[in-house]
Image: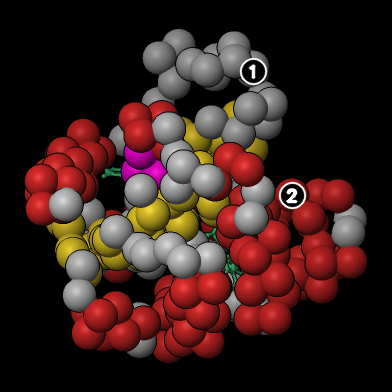
Amino acid sequence: MRLILLGPPGAGKGTQSKILETEYGVAQIATGDMLRAEVAAGSPVGMEAKAVMAAGGLVSDDIIIRMLKNRVSQPDCQKGFILDGFPRTIPQAEALDALLHEMDMDLDAVIALEVNEPVLVERISGRFSCKTCNAGYHETFKRPKIDGTCDVCGGHEFIHRADDKAETVHARLEAYNAQTAPILPYYRAQGRFFTVDGMAEMDEVSSQIAAILDRLHALN
Ligand code: AP5
């Protein structure tokens, strides 16, 4: 299975990709997570990306495309992958098409999560994650089962993302509207483009995505 999950910041791409990764045994490729790892490691890519990410802008296409090419050629992507946060510009979408063509691969589906702006802001501002294992939570929508303890690893330290501050969130939404939203018609024109109601509860969003994948599977 090769899938793209599209949607604005906070739409639920990371949440749903992790569920799909577990259910279908395919790799989640989250360019935001990869960039945060580069920033934490202090690598040249991380140093270049850090200020752009902190300001809510998009990291250069060159860096991202190079990073993505390396990632999809890893053995764990042989069975398939879910792209979370990539592509984000028309040049990235075109580079992905060229790469898939080179590798003699097709995309099964491009699924866009639709969520309105006030809800996006609410989701991002309440988000936090476990410092040890990176499991994601939300102050209202997904609290740990035991307050202060990570459900996954039992860790007790939680962190907020540096770019989840209110002023940065607005810059990220602007970047999405200006640079990423134009790729929706690009994929709609290619077919196998689907939208789901990302405002629904997490389980319901997962069911909508599963129904799309089941329908596609039945056609193949
Ligand atoms: P990235 O890490 O990709 O961030 P993003 O796209 O802004 O998306 P988020 O991670 O904020 O949201 P999400 O859709 O994954 O939502 P989540 O599931 O966490 O990118 C960060 C930065 O890196 C970019 O700004 C850019 O600078 C750079 N970058 C990355 N990729 C790039 C690229 N390709 N090109 C250039 N630059 C790039 O959910 C959010 C919260 O809501 C969570 O707390 C969750 O628990 C909750 N939630 C999820 N679903 C629901 C639901 N259905 N109901 C209620 N709550 C929900």
Which numbered disc flags the more N-terminal residue, 1 or 2? 2
Above or below 157: residue 121 = below
The magenta stretch spans residue 182: no
Corner quadrant of residue 72? bottom right
How far apart marks 1 and 2 lie (CA) works out to: 21 Å
Left or right, 100 with respect to 119, comes to right
Left or right, 215 with respect to 87, comes to left
Q: Secondary structure at mark 1?
A: loop
Q: Which residues are magenta?
A: 16-20
Picture mark count: 2
Q: What residue is shown at x 51% (from left), y 79% (from top)?
A: 98
Residue type at the position of mark 1: His
Depth-wise, is mark 1 or mark 2 nearer the camera? 2
In the rendered image, residue 1, in percent from the top left (x then y), is placed at 36, 48
In the rendered image, residue 179, in percent from the top left (x then y), is placed at 46, 85
In the rendered image, residue 163, in percent from the top left (x then y), is placed at 61, 60
Above or below 90: residue 149 = above
Q: Which mark is residue 37?
A: 2
In the foreground, 84 or 157: 84
Q: What residue is shown at x 86% (from left), y 49% (from top)?
A: 41
Above or below 52: residue 112 = above
Left or right, 194 with respect to 157, comes to left
Q: What residue is shown at x 64% (from left), y 65% (from top)?
A: 69
In the foreground, 123 or 71: 71
- Reading the image, the residue beneath label 1 is 156
Report if residue 13 is visible in the image. no
Majority SS type along the magenta span: helix
Marks 1,2: beta carbons within 8 A:
no
In the rendered image, residue 58, in percent from the top left (x then y), is placed at 60, 77
Q: Secondary structure at mark 2?
A: helix
Corner quadrant of residue 71? bottom right
Q: What residue is shown at x 54% (from left), y 46% (from top)?
A: 77
